[in-house]
Image (spheres, rainbow, N blue to C red):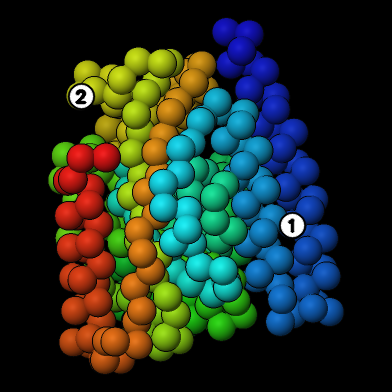
Amino acid sequence: MIMRGVKIVLCCLSFVLFLLSAFLLHVAGVFFSHHRWKMLSGLNKIYAWSLRMIAGVRIVVKGREHIPRSAGYLVISNHLTYLDGVVLGSIFPVIYLSKKAIKKWPGINWMVSISGTIFIDRERKSASLESIDAIVKRLRQRANVLLFPEGTSTNGDKLKEFQSVFFAAPLMTQSLIVPVIIRYRKVNNEPVTHSNRHSIYWWGQIPFQNHLYQLLRMKSIDAQVDVLPAVETEKFQNSSIGRKELAKYAYDIINAESCAPA
């Protein structure tokens, strides 16, 4: 109980520091507008790293040599829990994409808004075009963007078909796509199995606040992140057909590697 209380206090302190830092960056962005999103993605990485340390998440990164040296690429990954964003965000400096509903979550809404998160409204087609335009602007300003193309978190049994619409952005900018696979290996030093994975995975089976409260009780979480070779988008036609082919190509890469022994 004491450990969980300490984690909550540290999370709150980290949150306040992040809000202040992000606010100052937004002010500075008025004068350095061309570097605004890249600077903000760097701050997001620092904040994600602090949350990961507070939560007791240990990471093994395989394929680190595949991370591009120059920024302005799209990171795509399978999606198991909201913790994925913290884990991957502590490795890659990124701007996040998130469903619009998260703006209604108390506390979380402030964080995602000031972090430069691009909100996705799947109920309006025009909103998707706005989101694509926002991704394009970030990529052209040499900021990386994190996308979970399944569209939602899952229980990990099967990789869901990728939504192709947001693959239009890297096609338009000819940006690299970095495929990533995230796996959770242990919780409290015990192997993650079907019987205990619910303590980490979150696919809407219980309210978010309840799950987060339980997650903070964990002493340690071990994750593995496999970074795969980057996909060069200029090989694909910048069209609706090319976008769907690119999404399928990326899906096949992650699906094949996620099923292979790690």
Residue at the (23%, 86%) spot, across then down: 242
Label 2: which residue? 194
Are there few (<14), some (14-19), or many (20+) residues within 10 Å of tag 2? few
Q: Quadrant of the C terminus?
A: top left
Q: Which mark is residue 151?
A: none
Q: Nearer the viewer, residue 157 or 257?
A: 257
How many marks are shown on the rendered structure? 2
Query: From where the camera sits, is residue 129 visible?
Result: no
Q: In the rendered view of the protein, which quadrant contains the N terminus?
A: top right
What amino acid type is highlighted by mark number 1?
Ala
Residue indicated by mark 1: 22
Question: Could one spot residue 12 in this view of the protein?
Answer: yes
| First reached walking from the N terminus: tag 2 or tag 1 | 1
Mark 2, secondary structure of its residue: loop
Residue at the spot x=64%, y=16% of the render?
5
**In the depicted structure, whether residue 224 falls above or below residue 174:** above
